[in-house]
């Protein structure tokens, strides 16, 4: 191989590429969830410090509890929804499920289009074309080099 030759990229079959892309997507989802967890911990600690140590909003209570408790509980709820989305729903609604749903919808649309085309053909039939007598034996061949 010479120095100036183009390097060829190794080819990956489509099935292998789909597996790699799926794995990369899952890794990104889990990474975002872990970041969310770390952000939640830091935020919860910050809310507690703001309320308890700095005294900001100490007099504001909701149903007899400090406001930061409700904020943390709400954040826990969103974190749990995020976790369920990553670990539970993704198992049922993965790429395979998406492809099945797409195929199902495409088939439904194709059936509907065929049904509509049939209704149009029955309601508005195309006029029959009149066929001209075949004169290929008597006709002279057209020379492509002659002007029109």
Image (cartoon, helix red, strand yellow):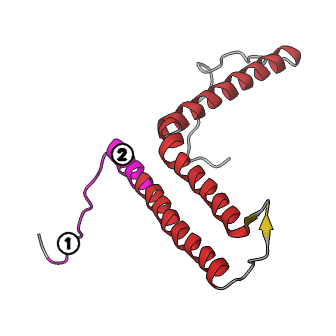
Residue 17 left/right relative to 94: left
Instruction: Please tell me whether residue 6 belongs to the stretch shown in magenta.
Output: yes
Q: Is there CB contact under 8 Å for labels 2 and 1?
A: no
Task: Find residue 128 and report its image quarter.
Answer: top right
**Which disc number belongs to residue 5?**
1
Q: Earlier in the sequence, mark 2 or mark 1?
A: 1
Q: Residue furthest front?
A: 64
The N terminus, quarter of image: bottom left
Residue 20 left/right relative to 94: left
Viewer-nearest residue: 72 or 89 = 72
Question: Which range of residues does the magenta coloring cover?
Answer: 3-25
Q: Is residue 143 above or below residue 24?
A: above
The residue depicted at 24 percent of the width and 70 percent of the height is: 6
Residue 80 left/right relative to 61: left
Q: Which residue is mark 2?
A: 19
Viewer-nearest residue: 84 or 16 = 84
Q: Secondary structure at mark 1?
A: loop
Q: Is residue 48 above or below residue 105?
A: below
Marks 2 and 1 sit apart, C-alpha to C-alpha, by 31 Å
**Which disc number belongs to residue 29?**
none
Residue 145, image x, y percentages: 55, 48
The residue depicted at 67 percent of the width and 25 percent of the height is: 108
Local packing at callout 1 (Cα closer than 10 Å; few below 14, some 14-19, many 20+) is few
The residue depicted at 52 percent of the width and 64 percent of the height is: 36
Instruction: Please tell me whether residue 93 belongs to the stretch shown in magenta.
Output: no
């Amino acid at each position: 191989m010479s120095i100036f030759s183009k390097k060829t990229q190794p080819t990956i079959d489509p099935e292998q590429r789909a597996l790699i892309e799926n794995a990369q997507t899952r890794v990104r989802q889990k990474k975002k969830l872990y970041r969310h967890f770390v952000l939640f911990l830091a935020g919860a600690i910050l809310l507690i410090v703001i309320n308890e140590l700095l005294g900001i909003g100490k007099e504001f209570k909701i149903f007899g509890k400090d406001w930061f408790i409700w904020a943390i509980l709400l954040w826990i709820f969103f974190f749990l929804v995020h976790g369920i989305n990553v670990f539970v729903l993704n198992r049922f609604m993965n790429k395979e499920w998406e492809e099945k749903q797409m195929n199902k919808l495409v088939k439904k649309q194709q059936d509907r289009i065929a049904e509509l085309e049939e209704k149009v053909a029955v309601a508005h039939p195309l006029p029959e074309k009149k066929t001209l007598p075949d004169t290929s034996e008597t006709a002279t061949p057209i020379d492509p080099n002659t002007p029109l």
